[in-house]
Amino acid sequence: MSKKDKKAAAAHEKPADAVAVELTHPERVVKDYAPTPDYPHYRVEPGEKFDLSERDPDASEHFQSKEDVKEELKHQRDRITDLQARLYGEQKRSLLIVLQATDTGGKDGTIKGVFKGVNPQGCRVQAFKQPGDEESNHDFLWRYHQHTPPRGMITIFNRSHYEDVLVVRVKSLQPEEVWRERYRIINEWEHSLCLSNTTILKFFLHISKDEQKRRLESRLSDPRKQWKFSPNDLKERELWDEYQVAFQDAITKCSTPYAPWYVVPSNKKWYRNVVIARAIADTLEAMDPQFPPPEKGLHKVRIPD
Ligand code: AMP
Ligand code: MG
């Protein structure tokens, strides 16, 4: 066997997870590299005994107010803006960001607060509502797969394929034997995306039931927010405990080395934004996207008058 063949065979023998990790380099797997190691990441480690009810949605480190994180948030946003320009120029890899939360959890606010300043040309937001007829007539991943980010892009899923093990489970829209298989299917699908150079980050915006009450009340009383209120939100709220169990299960079963879940304390919107911005900036930095090299001989080029 030639040297080259031996190397190829060795790569082939590696467990699939190891190959995906090498290819995607998410923030967590970069060896000897800790961009800002002091802050909590709120990442759920694969195989960790994870209890959602023990996570404090009010946490905010030593920060007391929005003013306290202003500088830090700006710093993280600047990092994202710079790294996104490189990712876009490189055109080799992509980043998929999944946002999940209960109603009023802050998905829309996160997108506004974290991605301010990012070049819209390199970034897409895709929201998923109840599936339409055509979508329901396909396998459940069909509608999501069409919107995964192409090379060079960041795509944000505002709700995602996880709805198919959340609302579908809680509301019994499919029998258990159907949704139960989906955790495995989701892991395999995410793995296949990683193997095609898509890095995946998944954020659960964790708020308390009290905080949801406050946010729903504010939607009812603020004329600029009333359009967001749906009577359906109250029906969903009655199912709060069932949703917490479904989130707990989805996060436990689907936090993998190649597509980790982050459980972000989100009662304080300003802290939530900082946590998410850090994780995205660190991940992009670990991916280390590079501008393509310039054409040779550029120094000789003169622009005619
Ligand atoms: P919103 O994001 O508040 O506009 O609401 C969208 C609604 O679509 C939520 O009630 C979701 O639970 C629902 N939804 C999203 N994805 C699915 C799905 N795959 N199956 C059923 N309902 C869904
Ligand atoms: Mg809603």
Image: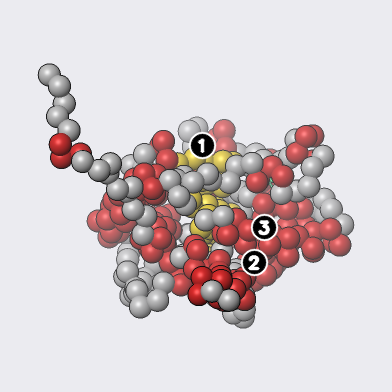
Q: Quadrant of the N terminus?
A: bottom right
Q: Name the residue rendered at 56%, 55% in the picture.
A: 196
Q: Is residue 23 visible?
A: yes
Q: Amino acid at mark 3?
A: Trp
Which mark lies nearer to you, 1 or 3? 3
In the picture, measured across the screen, residue 9 lies left or right of residue 24, that is right
Residue that badge 1 annotates: 225
Where's residue 274, x and y in %? 37, 58
In the picture, measured across the screen, residue 173 lies left or right of residue 269, that is right
Q: Amino acid at mark 1?
A: Lys
Q: Helix or strand or loop: what does disc 2 sit on?
A: helix
Q: Amino acid at mark 2?
A: Cys
Where's residue 109, x and y in %? 46, 46
Q: Earlier in the sequence, mark 1 or mark 2?
A: 1
Q: Name the residue rendered at 50%, 75% in the picture.
A: 3
When the figure is inspected, residue 116 is found, relative to residue 237, above or below; the finding is above
Q: Nearer the viewer, residue 305 or 65?
A: 305
> Could you tell me if the residues under marks 1 and 3 are in contact, i.e. CB atoms within 8 Å?
no
Q: Name the residue rendered at 65%, 45% in the picture.
A: 144
The residue at the far front in this view is 2
In the picture, measured across the screen, residue 146 lies left or right of residue 257, that is right
Q: Nearer the viewer, residue 79 or 300?
A: 300
The response on whether ligand 2 sits within 8 Å of label 1 is no
Where's residue 287, x and y in %? 40, 60
Instruction: Determine the CA span between mark 1 and mark 2.
Output: 34 Å
Residue that badge 3 annotates: 189
Residue that badge 2 annotates: 254
Instruction: Determine the CA span between mark 1 and mark 3.
Output: 36 Å
Q: Helix or strand or loop: what does disc 1 sit on?
A: loop
Q: Is residue 52 visible?
A: no
Circle 3 Cα neighbour tier, 10 Å, few/some/many (<14 / 14–19 / ≥20): some
> Could you tell me if the residues under marks 2 and 3 are in contact, i.e. CB atoms within 8 Å?
no
